[in-house]
Image (spheres, grey):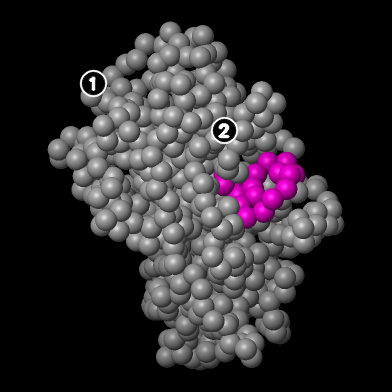
Amino acid sequence: MAAAVSTAVTNKSHLSSALDKPFTTPSQKLLSLAVKTLPKPYHHHHRTLITAASKNPLTDVVSSKPIPDGRSFDSYFHDDDDKPREECGVVGIYGDSEASRLCYLALHALQHRGQEGAGIVCVNDNVLKSITGVGLVSDVFSESKLDQLPGDLAIGHVRYSTAGSSMLKNVQPFVASYRFGSVGVAHNGNLVNYKQLRGELEENGSIFNTSSDTEVVLHLIAISKARPFLLRIVEACEKIEGAYSMVFATEDKLVAVRDPYGFRPLVMGRRSNGAVVFASETCALDLIEATYEREVLPGEVVVVDKEGVQSICLMPHPEPKSCIFEHIYFALPNSVVFGRSVYESRRAFGEILATEAPVECDVVIAVPDSGVVAALGYAAKAGVPFQQGLIRSHYVGRTFIEPSQKIRDFGVKLKLSPVRAVLEGKRVVVVDDSIVRGTTSSKIVRLLKEAGAKEVHMRIASPPIIASCYYGVDTPSSEELISNRMSVEEIREYIGSDSLAFLPIESLNKLLGSDSKSYCYACFSGNYPVEPTGKVKRIGDFMDDGLSGDMDSIDGGWLPGSSKVQKKIILNEVRTS
């Protein structure tokens, strides 16, 4: 692994263009688990689809028509943000007559976790009704749509995924019927044994209508012989492996579940009228004026119904392995995630960089928006002014017209504009949260130098990313990760900066103190808490959106050692078929 910190300041000519260069508890024991009361809070042109619960089998999840313009994902986003993407965000609300509207607002607060699709399921008179759509929350829902979702129980979901002709059918929450009623589910995470489970279910006659691993959970619930419904969830969770923070809605219950490792966040809060709320982040609770009470514990099932709030331990759980990237990038700074303030974490990351990788500079700037708090920490610690050297456009939509004469770095320039008055003639430290492929970083460095910056020193508020994530984060294959194939100095030369330093992982562990062992660092180390086997999906809803063919022929989720040549051949066959 490359050295954690390198502050090489030797000027080398800038590159003219960015190169492309176990579950152990048997169900019999779970059936006899005594349900206990919940512990006291602890401190630590878009289309929509409306479906009603039917009496048809699980294949009735949703149906869709192709996206009218038929464009590819790349046509929507010409320039890759070059960032890991969080899969999605979930919300659940019980006991408020305005449940669907509160769910809508909470999804707004979680919009940063997924911008490709959104949905809400509401329960009224024992009927589950769903509205889902492609696009932002505000595009999918309107006053008239929310009027169609009465009831005091609702779950919601925002989703990031690829686009494609079958995308809408993968938008959650899913609603399905089985012999004892209907169930809706919204899932944040990724199941690493999805392929195996789906194969077994299909061998036994199950028919799948989506490419989402979440549908596997619905099938496992449907075939379970356990009673009551709660223990069907428990039995299903005995069989799935990986990351899952899920909320379920039945005719009379809201159920929240978190995997035994606690990879993805899930918090619980309560409104002043007693309504119980679950959400991926506390920022969603804040918006709808719900008081944060606690996290849903790793390996816990929380049930809310007319009897109140109850909890059981899903299964014996190992040491938690919460995703450290929630604090580095995914969560909003005003959220509390895994019991820690995201703002305080990021500010501390910047202070560490200023202490361990100092450099003579005139101004500190950030790559907005995720690098801002770390840049503030760096500037304060270094005693150097923080200024806005890059302005982000908040009006770049899903489509735009590219000029016929190619403009270099067109996509980045649409999103980020340098401020010449801040940069000209200055030695600049620019703080970003991560480097993935390095393509965007190289373009940013070039923009800053073209705007007159005398020197550009990159400081990255995370350790180098050397491995893919299989727990609900969309990251490229390991072969595409620049830190997996280059040293820090080679990356510095590639992006054209005058110096480059990453957050040392030893310093990160020291900052987290006794909590450090409770976080997952697989993307920094390649050591996976739940080892993926064979070929697994990289993210939960990614496998074959918009493509047809066998699961094995879709790029994504390739384990180290897979043949790059073979992958390219297969991909070309799929794309031309």
**Residue 449 occupies quadrant:** bottom right
Q: Mark 2 points at which residue?
A: 216
- Residue drawn at x 35%, y 40% as measured from the top left: 129
Residue 307: assigned label = 1
Q: Where is residue 84 in the image (x, y as percent from the top left)?
A: 56, 57
- Residue drawn at x 40%, y 25% as measured from the top left: 181
Q: Where is residue 549 in the image (x, y as percent from the top left)?
A: 73, 48
**Residue 394 occupies quadrant:** bottom left
Local SS, label 2: helix
Quick one: 320 or 348, which is closer to the camera?
Answer: 320
Residue 407: assigned label = none
Q: Is residue 276 left or right of residue 510?
A: left
- Residue drawn at x 51%, y 46% as measured from the top left: 63
Quadrant of the drawing holding the C terminus: bottom right
Mark found first going from the N terminus, 2 or 1: 2
Q: Which residue lies furthest to the left in this view?
A: 273
Main SS type for the magenta part? Answer: loop
Identify residue type, mark 1.
Answer: Glu
Compared to residue 33, the image places residue 401 above or below, namely below
Q: Position of residue 540 (x, y in %)?
A: 57, 44
Q: Does the magenta stretch include residue 549?
A: yes
Extent of the magenta region: 535-552
